[in-house]
């Protein structure tokens, strides 16, 4: 059975293969990529930022971001081509968060984990206590 899906760009139902967009949108994306790539390939545009590329080519920021994430536009070649961190908007070239925000997030996660450990320990402790009371009760009888 063919795997049917909705195109993430136009919503049209299509047979899903490796892409998440339909054939028409794929063609459009490829054309857009070509425009962006042609623009960036020129020596003078090598250091263009994402916003500058959007303005110069008219291609959607989200689409260019997708190309960067897919590594089709390499930030080693185009050093200024970062997209904003989802938290603080600092330009980044991989993932969703900048180094700082990623570090912060990790910190938060560590704290949550520690809290969970403490809660777990307290639970165990109170179970122990119950055990003790039970034993004492038995002795009294
Ligand atoms: Zn489509
Ligand atoms: Zn950030």
Image (cartoon, rainbow, N blue to C red):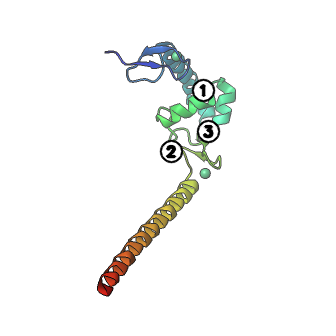
How many angstroms separate mark 3 from mark 2 (CA)? 21 Å
Please name which of the two marks, 1 or 2, marks the residue nearer to the observer: 2
Q: Are marks 3 and 2 in contact (CB under 8 Å)?
A: no
* Residue holding disc 1: 39
Q: Position of residue 133 (x, y in %)?
A: 37, 80
Label 1 crowd (10 A; few <14 / some 14-19 / many >=20): some
- Quick check: 118 left or right of 80? left
Q: Is residue 33 above or below residue 111?
A: above
Camera-side residue of 58 and 37: 58
- Check residue 119 in the rendering and tell me which mark sits there, or answer none: none
- Quick check: 49 left or right of 72? right
- Check residue 95 in the rendering and tell me which mark sits there, or answer none: 2
* Residue holding disc 3: 47
Q: Are marks 1 and 3 in contact (CB under 8 Å)?
A: no
Label 2 crowd (10 A; few <14 / some 14-19 / many >=20): few
Camera-side residue of 79 and 135: 135
- Quick check: 113 left or right of 139? right
SS of the residue under disc 3: loop
Q: Residue at x 31, y 15 (%)?
A: 1
SS of the residue under disc 2: loop
SS of the residue under disc 1: helix
- Quick check: 98 left or right of 135? right
Q: Residue at x 56, y 59 (%)?
A: 104
Marked residue nearer the N-terminal end (1 or 2): 1
Label 3 crowd (10 A; few <14 / some 14-19 / many >=20): some
Q: Residue at x 34, y 78 (%)?
A: 134
Q: Position of residue 31 (x, y in %)?
A: 54, 18
Marked residue nearer the N-terminal end (1 or 3): 1
């Amino acid at each position: 059975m063919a795997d049917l899906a909705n195109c993430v760009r136009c919503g049209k139902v299509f047979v899903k293969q490796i892409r998440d967009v339909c054939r028409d949108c794929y063609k459009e994306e490829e054309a857009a990529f070509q425009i962006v790539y042609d623009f960036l390939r020129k020596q003078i545009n090598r250091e263009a930022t994402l916003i500058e590329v959007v303005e110069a080519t008219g291609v959607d920021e989200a689409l260019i971001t997708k190309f960067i994430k897919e590594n089709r536009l390499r930030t080693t070649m185009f050093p200024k081509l970062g997209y904003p961190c989802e938290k603080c908007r600092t330009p980044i070239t991989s993932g969703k968060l900048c180094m700082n925000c990623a570090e912060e997030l990790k910190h938060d996660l560590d704290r949550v984990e520690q809290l969970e450990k403490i809660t777990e320990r307290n639970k165990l402790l109170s179970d122990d206590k119950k055990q003790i009371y039970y034993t004492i009760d038995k002795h009294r009888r």
